[in-house]
Amino acid sequence: MMSKTALYLVLLGLLYHETDCQSIEFDSGEAFTAIDPSVVADASNYADPKVTGSYLFQSDTTFDQKALSLSVLVQHFRSDSSFYFRAHPTFITCLQATLTSLRKQNLRVDIVSAFKTSSDVPGSIKARDLYSRSGTGATLKFRPGVSGDIRDIANTAIKSCASTFSVIQRDIGVVLMLDSVHIFMTGRLDTTPQFTVDGYTGGMTSDAFRTYAMAKLGEANEPAVIPTDCSSFGSLLSGTTFPSWATDAAVVVGDHDVPILRENTQDFSRLTQYMGTNVEFVDHERTSTWCGSVGQACVDCRAGIVGSALSKRYVSKGSLLCVCVSCNVS
């Protein structure tokens, strides 16, 4: 017969599991139990310094071959110095998409590092180390015998990840290094895309790389066929409707499921930002006194997106979709 003490411990364990453990499923279909970092010894060693919302998992070498996605294994993420690792399902989705796209280009790469503990990078304030500690960063390097420009890795990551991150109001980060590329998903502390150079010898500064990467970000989302003469398209005057015969929106697009109110930030957070730049709209209200919510400054995104956080996407009163200019419209 179970003693009162034993029964108490069992019930306590069940309560702990119910309140502090969460099952997180990754693209592989594998589910891992996230643990509360505060109950782990030396908790600061496994903190999420960039506030990405990643999860902490306990592991050991028997878990190394478990898959987070088709090509990403636990062993790619677990630090050699620890049996814990951090990961975020959205970043794993991006990482897999990048690996798959590079493979189709006959550019095979290896994940040479991912999650790191604080003791792995003591005192480092480099973005790539902080995001590795948060579990939303990984360094990719061409496999031996593969020749290519490491900017091909960067370009592929930008194309594969930026829109995916934007859905959860996060941005992409890329660091060009000597012979490898670090890609990461930002957290709440960084609200714009992050593009820097650290050791790259290809004659490109961080500022130049940012300009280059932002152009690639726009190219990745442009339509397959781009009109060269915007004058061939009809225009719509202010106050008029298209199609002209429509009496209301429901006649054309059907009944809406959920209304989106201009004063409700939560409503607007459900919208997704278009990441491209070839858009035939003009940002007339970029100088408005408030955008989306009272006190929220407007964003001038005519040259390109500013960021995926809500504070970087408000562009006009009641509009969360930041659109940019094409065809020399100003």
Image: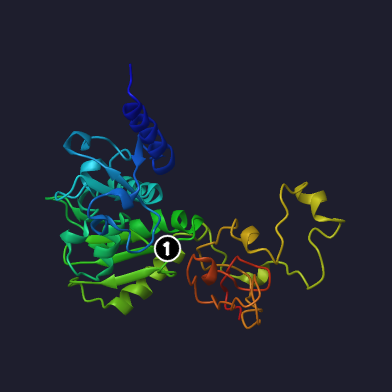
Which residue is denoted by mark 1 in the rendering? 171
Question: Among all residues in the image, which is located at the extreme top?
Answer: 1
Question: Among all residues in the image, which is located at the extreme front?
Answer: 4
Residue 167 % position (x, y):
50, 55
- Under tag 1, what secondary structure? loop
Residue 155 appears in which quarter of the rendering? bottom left
The relative height of residue 44 versus residue 57 in the rendered view (above or below) is below
Residue at image point 19% right, 55% down = 141
Residue 256 vs residue 22, the one in the foreground = 22
Q: What coloring was used for the rendering?
A: rainbow
Q: Is residue 65 left or right of residue 183?
A: left
Residue 32 appears in which quarter of the rendering? top left
Residue 320 % position (x, y):
61, 66
Residue 88 vs residue 150, the one in the foreground = 88
Residue at image point 23% right, 57% down = 45
Dot 1 amino acid type: Asp
- Where does the N terminus fall, quadrant-wise? top left
Residue 52 appears in which quarter of the rendering? bottom left
Q: Is residue 39 left or right of residue 149?
A: right
The relative height of residue 67 versus residue 52 in the rendered view (above or below) is above
Q: Is residue 273 left or right of residue 44?
A: right
Q: Residues within 10 Å of mark 1 (few under 14, many from 20)?
A: many
